Image (cartoon, helix red, strand yellow):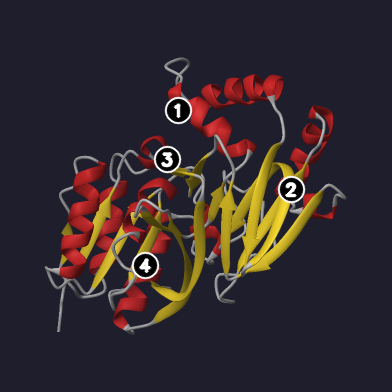
Amino acid sequence: MSEHLAVLLNPSAGRGRLRGGGVDDVLAALATAGREVRVLDAADEAAALAAAHRAVRDDGAYALVAVVGDGTLNLALQAVPGTDVPLGLVPAGTGNDFAAQVGLPADPVAAARVIATAVSGDRVRDLDLARVDAADGYRRWFGAVLAAGFDAVVNEKANRMRWPKGPRRYDLAIVAELLRMRPRRYTLVLDGEPIEVDAMLVAVGNTASYGGGLRICPAADPTDGLLDVVVGARMTRLTMMRIKPRLYQGTHVDHPLVTSYRAATVEIHAEGITSYVDGERACPLPLTVTSVPAALRLLA
């Protein structure tokens, strides 16, 4: 029987939320499961991804434990589908949307204790993941939401900006894109049925929220084998600004310019859009998103 817990650690997540003694406290809580705890060597994104794959497929880890924010969690999600190795999640970022949606404690040490208890009892929950595929062979898994509209355009612009640093960069990117915003022509193919729409927003959710609690796909359920697709049609800047506060409660889906769909497979075609998954840059459209039932075995 494999004995150790392989820990993918990002101490800078959440603007250094675990610096100081926080990391040691989390590792000590994990050790109460009675298994060796091994921290993976992950100096950068490429090293983290390689280390996670190696731990799961070659090194005989009992579980991969991600002590991360949503971005580095997405790296961990690339390693576990198709294996019997469960994932433990210790939320250490600023948003932690996926962790909140699957009911994990917000406190990192409390989440580590939940994982240790689950390991001791060999207890896992089977959850769906979403898989992105593009024609060039690109593939990426995600747990929360794929953005393919105005929000993705803002992310792309903010990531190209050298100034300012921090959250203000996104605020400026939003203002800049609002000034030039325009609907784009999308072709969506939902379980084989095509839909043509001029839209400002297209989001595909395995779970409900992204961006630190914005419930963009409020009815999304990671156990139903389906994806929730939310489309915001052509609208004015004023309408968009009025709808935005409703995202926190998920009531934007009641607006007449917002339409929701549900499908197991979603194709998205549009020009000039680069998609983002779990807040991380993915690939340009077109792409296909597929719900993969029980692709994730979560320690919880």
Q: Which amino acid lies under the numbered mark 1 shown in the image of this protein?
A: Asn
Query: Relative to residue 87, is residue 150 depicted above or below?
Result: above
Q: Name the residue under label 4.
A: 113
Residue lying at 57% horizontally and 46% vertically, measured from the top left: 147
In the visual, does 224 lie left or right of 14? Answer: right
For the residues labelled 3 and 4, the Cα–Cα distance comes to: 20 Å
Sequence-wise first label, 3 or 4: 3
Label placed on residue 197: 2
Q: Which mark is in front, 3 or 1?
A: 1
Q: Whole-Å distance between the Cαs marked 2 and 3?
A: 37 Å
User: Would residue 258 be found to the left or right of residue 275 on screen?
Assistant: right
Nearer the viewer's eye, disc 3 or disc 4? 3
- Vertical order, 118 against 170 (above or below): below
Q: Is mark 1 on a helix, strand or loop?
A: helix
Q: In which quarter of the image is residue 238?
A: top right
SS at badge 4: helix
Instruction: Provide the residue designation for mark 3.
Output: 14
Q: Where is mark 1, residue-wise?
A: 159
Q: What element carries label 3?
A: helix
Tally of numbered tags:
4
Neighbour tally class for label 3: few under 14, some 14-19, many 20 plus, Cα within 10 Å: some
Q: Residue furthest right?
A: 256
Question: x, y (%) of residue 104?
Answer: 49, 64
What is the C-alpha distance between the residues marked 1 and 4?
Answer: 35 Å
Please report whichever mark, 2 or 4, sits nearer to the chain's N-terminal start.
Answer: 4
Image x and y of residue 273, in percent: 54, 38
Q: Nearer the viewer, residue 98 or 240?
A: 240
